[in-house]
Image (cartoon, rainbow, N blue to C red):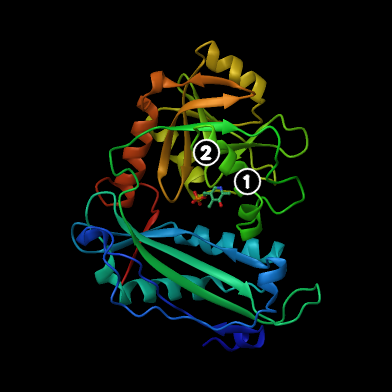
């Protein structure tokens, strides 16, 4: 174990938790042991949410190699989140080598059916048992692995999204650009209310004016204007997604223009109505690209791309997942192999 980490108060707790075998039909309990740690109820993470995490995937290619997609971006973002939450940084080489070793060790659990992968969840929590409000002096860093099935079990299908006009997720200067649990705890209520009205996810507006598009739950949002793909800028209150960055770099190679600019929700609704916005989709590691076919704002619901998956959305999905799974040439050097 790295001595500087021990002196920074980080315990070497790497664990692997396998919760299913999608390659054997989904719900079979894993035979691999599930390590647990016993924690004092006073640990700071339980009271003050000093916690950060990451999310990435390992893909088993047809030639049996195991690929990670841009893991260096996750290592960097993890440390940016750590800095915001006053937690110690994990050296990038250690973060990456730890994941590579763990994934290599568990490579037989990586499912191979189309659309499946091994989800990797690094996390760090504050474990000092003390109720004083200050940064913890002791942390656990650990990595959970879980085989995941095809995100779109019944085919690549579009979702309906509710634009949230009451609750806010993040404000400039807040923790919106860090991947930290508190952002999610505060967003659960809006998510439940959106579900009750028949929508799958919530689209957050900026926390100051509630006027500009921020992002969806765990996805960055894109809107297609003809052949131009538009997304909100990294304003400080949205998560800088690895998939978002990949779409911005990949789209021009497919002949599309990309723009990062503030998107006023009123303009957006008018542009959808007028047919200027032809497609919308979200981007995130879990589903890669999620087509959006319905958008509701202040009781008004508009349909996008005729309720179907848009052509550009589909092309981007095919291109990105093609690179991740080795079916397409990777001109960016985004893929790295483990084991
Ligand atoms: C993780 C996450 C995303 C997506 O980021 P990727 O790196 O593309 O997976 C978007 N928004 C939020 C709030 C997130 O936590």
> Of helix, strand and loop, which one carries label 2?
helix
Q: Quadrant of residue 255?
A: top left
Q: Quadrant of residue 338?
A: bottom left
Using the image as rendered, state which of residue 201 and residue 142 is in the foreground.
201
User: What residue do we see at 52% from left, 19% from top?
Assistant: 302
User: What residue do we see at 40% from left, 46% from top?
Assistant: 287
User: What residue do we see at 66% from left, 51% from top?
Assistant: 186
Mark 2–mark 1 Cα distance, whole angstroms, equals 10 Å
User: What residue do we see at 47% from left, 42% from top?
Assistant: 283
Q: Is residue 189 above or below residue 315?
A: below
> Of helix, strand and loop, which one carries label 1?
helix
Identify the disc placed on residue 80: none
Give the quarter of the figure containing the C terminus.
Answer: bottom left
Position of residue 11 measured from the top left corner of the image (x, y, whole percent): 57, 84
Q: Which residue is mark 2?
A: 195
Disc 2, ligand 1: is the CB inside 8 Å? no
Q: Which residue is mark 1?
A: 189
**257 relative to 113 in the view: left or right:** right
Q: Is residue 169 above or below residue 9?
A: above
- Label 2–label 1 contact, CB within 8 A: no
Using the image as rendered, state which of residue 193 and residue 275 is in the foreground.
193
Disc 1, ligand 1: is the CB inside 8 Å? no
Q: Residues within 10 Å of mark 1 (few under 14, many from 20)?
A: few
Pointer 2 or 1: first along the chain: 1
């Amino acid at each position: 174990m790295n001595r500087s980490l021990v002196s920074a108060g980080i315990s070497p707790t790497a664990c692997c938790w396998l919760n299913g075998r999608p390659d054997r039909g989904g719900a079979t309990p894993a035979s691999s042991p599930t390590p647990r740690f016993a924690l004092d109820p006073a640990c700071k993470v339980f009271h003050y949410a000093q916690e950060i995490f990451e999310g990435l995937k390992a893909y088993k290619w047809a030639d049996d190699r195991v690929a990670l997609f841009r893991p260096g971006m996750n290592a960097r973002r993890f440390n940016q989140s750590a800095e915001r939450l006053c937690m110690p940084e994990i050296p990038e080489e250690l973060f990456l080598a730890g994941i590579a070793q763990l994934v290599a060790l568990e490579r037989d659990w990586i499912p191979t059916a189309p659309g499946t992968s091994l989800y990797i969840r690094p996390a760090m929590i504050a474990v000092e048992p003390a109720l004083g409000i200050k940064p913890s002096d002791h942390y656990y860093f650990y990595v959970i692995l879980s085989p995941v099935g095809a995100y779109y079990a019944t085919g690549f299908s579009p979702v309906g999204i509710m634009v949230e006009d009451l609750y806010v997720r993040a404000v400039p200067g807040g923790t919106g650009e860090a991947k930290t649990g508190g952002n999610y705890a505060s967003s659960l209520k809006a998510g439940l209310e959106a579900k009750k009205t028949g929508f799958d996810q919530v689209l957050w507006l900026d926390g100051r004016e509630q006027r500009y598009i921020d992002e969806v739950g765990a996805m960055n949002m894109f809107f297609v204007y003809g052949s131009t793909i538009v997304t909100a800028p990294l304003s400080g209150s949205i998560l800088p997604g690895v998939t978002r960055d990949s779409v911005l770099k990949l789209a021009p190679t497919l002949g599309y223009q990309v723009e990062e600019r503030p998107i006023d929700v009123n303009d957006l609704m008018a542009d959808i109505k007028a047919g200027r916005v032809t497609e919308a989709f979200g981007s995130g590691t879990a589903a890669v690209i999620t087509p959006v076919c319905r958008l509701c704002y202040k009781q008004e619901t508009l349909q996008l791309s005729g309720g179907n998956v848009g052509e550009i959305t589909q092309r981007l999905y095919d291109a990105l997942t093609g690179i991740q799974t080795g079916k397409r040439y990777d001109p960016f050097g985004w893929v790295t192999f483990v084991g």
